[in-house]
Image (tube, helix red, strand yellow):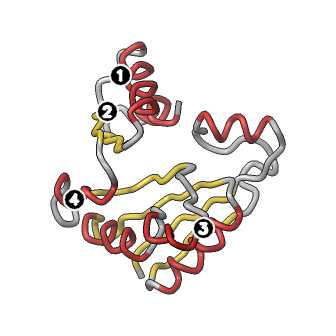
Amino acid sequence: LFTADTAEQHPDILLVAVEKVPDAMVVGMERVCDRGIKNVRFIDTDAAALPVIFESHEVDRIFINFCDPWPKKRDVKRRLTSPGFLAIYESILKQDGEVCFKTDNRPLFEYSLETFENEGWELTEVTENLHDNGPVGVMTDYEKKFYEQGMPINRLVAKRG
């Protein structure tokens, strides 16, 4: 839903969807194909491979939507907002590029806020209930479900400071 809707709203922008869960990627691909959307590419890989896919400072924006929270302490490095991943994002983002992160998982959100700040990123937007006054922006499937259940969605937007 998010990839197809975002691509339709911005036909002049190429969206590259990176997903390591094949089933999730196939759903996105089917939606894009069914709607005849031409400005999306899908890559089946882990986010750690981003520097191989993109040149240095090539990317305008990175969306991280409802990723696995990896709640166990031993898995902290796997979180897509861990210092290692933030370094990867910094290497491929343009000077004014940004990371947009959404999650329903409050502990992951708090961890992410702290990590972005500790790694020197500027938080340009922080909200703990994105849809408090009604739907905002393009929603993912998970986000739509959570919104309908009245669950708060946490969002942050960060730029390299």
Please rate how many residues cluster around mark 2, counting C-alpha atoms within 10 Å: few if below 14, some from 14 to 19, many from 20: many
User: Which comes sooner in the sequence, label 4 or label 2?
Assistant: 2
Q: In terms of image quadrants, where is residue 109?
A: bottom right
Determine whether label 1 and label 2 are within 8 Å by CB: yes
Identity of the residue drawn at 48% across and 54% down: 64
Q: Position of residue 100 (x, y in %)?
A: 50, 58
Q: Give the distance between the C-alpha atoms of the residues marked 1 and 2, in whole angstroms.
A: 7 Å
Q: Return the residue nearer the eye: 8 or 82.
A: 82
Dot label at residue 37 = 1
Q: Are marks 2 and 3 in contact (CB under 8 Å)?
A: no
Q: Residue 48 placed where, x, y %?
A: 30, 60
**Mark 4–mark 3 distance (CA, rounded to whole Å):** 23 Å
Q: Amino acid at mark 3?
A: Glu
From mark 4 to mark 2, how far is it between C-alphas? 16 Å
**Is 109 positioned to the left or the right of 122 in the image?**
right
Mark 3: give few (<14), some (14-19) or many (20+) Cα within 10 Å.
few
For label 4, the residue is 58
Residue visible at 57% across and 39% down? 138
Q: Position of residue 129 (x, y in %)?
A: 76, 57
Q: Amino acid at mark 1?
A: Ile
First-in-chain label (1 vs 4) = 1
Q: What residue is shown at x 41% (from left), y 13% (from top)?
A: 34
Q: Which secondary structure, mark 2?
A: strand
Question: Mark 3 or mark 2, which is nearer the start of the sequence?
Answer: 2
Q: Which residue is mark 3?
A: 125
Look at label 4 and name its amino acid: Glu
Residue 79 drawn above or below residue 36: below
Q: Amino acid at mark 2?
A: Val
